[in-house]
Image (cartoon, rainbow, N blue to C red):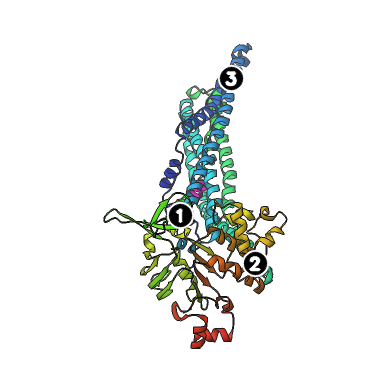
Amino acid sequence: MPPKTQRAAAKPENAFAALKRIFGYMYGFRIQFVLVVAGIFFSSGAGIAGNYLLKPIFDNIGDALKTGHWNYGRFIGLLTVMAVIYAIGAVSSFFYQRMMMKISTTTLMRIRNDLFNKMEMLPVRFFDKHTHGELMSLYTNDTDAVREMLSNSIAQFISSAITIVGVFIVMVVYSWRLTIIVIAMLFVIIKVIGFVGSRSSKGFIAQQKALGSVNGYIEEMIDGQKVVKVFCHEEKAGEEFDALNEELCRAATHANTFANILMPIMNNLSYIHYAVTAIVGGIFAVKHIGGMTIGTVISYLQYTRSFSQPITQVSQQLNSVLTALAGAERIFRVIDEEPETDNGYVTLVNAEIAPDGKITETDRRTGHWAWRHPHKADGTVTYTEVRGNVEFDDVVFGYEPGKTVLNGISLYAKPGQKIAFVGSTGAGKTTIINLINRFYDVPEGKIRYDGININKIKKADLRRSQSIVLQDTHLFTGTVMENIRYGKLDATDEEVYAAARLANADSFIRHLENGYDTMLTADGANLSQGQRQLLAIARAAVADPPVLILDEATSSIDTRTEALIEKGMDSLMEGRTVFVIAHRLSTVRNSHAIMVLEQGRIIERGSHSELIARQGKYYQLYTGMFELS
């Protein structure tokens, strides 16, 4: 198998394209998004208008102190208007934040749906090249970053832009002279943000990469915890995790150090700006330069704070936005992956077979299946009974270009035959199985199924005609009944019971706490490995396929149980084609044909007695050691 690659965090290659595509997922929310922008406008505008009222309020106080006459009606009226404006701002803020949360969560739901659905359509080759931790990180770290951007950063950017523009206009109207000080200070702020932000950005990129490595390692350790304990690898695992965790700590410290010092720096710069503006404004007010009043100075000072604060907020959000867009690009990269190609047009249908052999397609389940083969040349349709004839004709295959795993494989299997593959690890046994169900397509040679090239058969229909019991059993969260029924979703309870009896699983299932309703979690951790494989065999049996594939299906079952299973399997295998991969040679003695593989080639073939008589490689394996390494 090709090596798996580790995802590397990076800046977005095309931030605008990623953002545009995210907005594309907001379909159906155009009106709501317009309302969000309107809410932000009213919320930001309320802050600007509220500060604007400080001028007449304090001018009113100043006039009263000079004349000794208080205009209480005007004073209370101004305070009332200010209270109403701030109330409108508060309501608008609550409104747009609530609506933006709805938009962001729905958008993320759509992105996750597309991501998951695409992963279900990707070929096995894709998963060979990506670690589980790397793919899980798409659903956790990357989607969380996108969620934060949608729910907070976008609204913050819009709000800051409105505030900056609005405040700047008001400040110019108040005093263009004082605004020169603002522009000078703005230049200093931008320089500081650029210096600190660039270093913070590199740190956050390294932090995301380190976080992905830590998450991937944790997942591997959780999955392999029994192996860790068996080999007393706890201390070594702890050391490896400490190294990864230390790297994450170092990257996070570097990133957050610069991110966290930005606010204190900006606050101190705003204090300096505030003090300079207060001194100069006070002088202007005392000397009545440009019509400056005390009320104008007080209001203007509030605007200086309102002006610097959104700039700081934008600078803080910038890194999280870049991180989110980089994560979005990784998500979209998977969504844009080429799905598993399927040019097949031959389909599997229920069939009725007349005494004269004529096959008729039907919608009801009859227990008989046929391949529906449309012919493009003349538009006719022919039906071929599904029997399970499998033929390999000079097949050559490799997982990577230039590195072949199978070389010139030719074999055939007829209904009712049990074909066994033996050989050392890496000889190509599992690869042959992968080609039968089209997990991979062959570049050279042909594989025929009931005389039809399997490339012409739709993959889903091809796989429905087969059942596979893998060496690594996987059980899903659910009841025992549901896990067996996974092989045939419309199976009745009686069919499930029959399949369990056939696999010799019925006895131990009924001794479980809740029998067939016992809930399985953590991949069936509450069962023994042998019991899990018995359930996997029952799951294959309930599908009632014409082709059965057993990939080390009995490797974790004791000899006595294996003998009982073989008796049940005899009736299951009757009239079916069965492929068996086994290291335990005692399990393949009753096979009709045994294929001995070495370095991707079949070096011997024949029945057990024939191969023993030849005294070749199989004879050496059988008499020398009963289990292959």
Dot 2 lies on which element? helix
Residues 279 and 321: in front is 321
Dot 1: element: helix
Residue matched to label 3 = 57
Q: CA distance from mark 1 to mark 2?
A: 31 Å
Q: Earlier in the sequence, mark 2 or mark 3?
A: 3
Helix, strand or loop at mark 3:
helix
The quadrant holding residue 628 is bottom right
Residue 384 falls left or right of residue 151: left
Q: In the rendering, at what x and y percent does residue 202 appear? A: 51, 55
Which of 526/66 is in front? 526
Q: Position of residue 308 (x, y in %)?
A: 53, 37
Per the image, is 487 magenta? Answer: no
Q: Nearer the viewer, residue 98 or 183?
A: 98
**The residue under label 1 is which amino acid type?**
Met
Disc 2 from disc 3: Cα separation: 83 Å
Q: Which residue is mark 2?
A: 530
Residue numbers of the magenta segment: 318-326
Q: Look at 49% across and 34% down and name the residue there.
A: 164
Residue kind at label 3, given as amino acid type: Ile
In the displayed structure, 515 sits above or below 469; it is: above
Near-viewer residue (575 or 9): 575
Q: How many marks?
A: 3
- Read off the residue under disc 1: 121
Between the residue at mark 3 and the residue at mark 1, the CA separation in whole angstroms equals: 66 Å
Tell me the mark number nearer the camera, choosing from 2 and 3: 2
Amino acid marked by disc 2: Gly
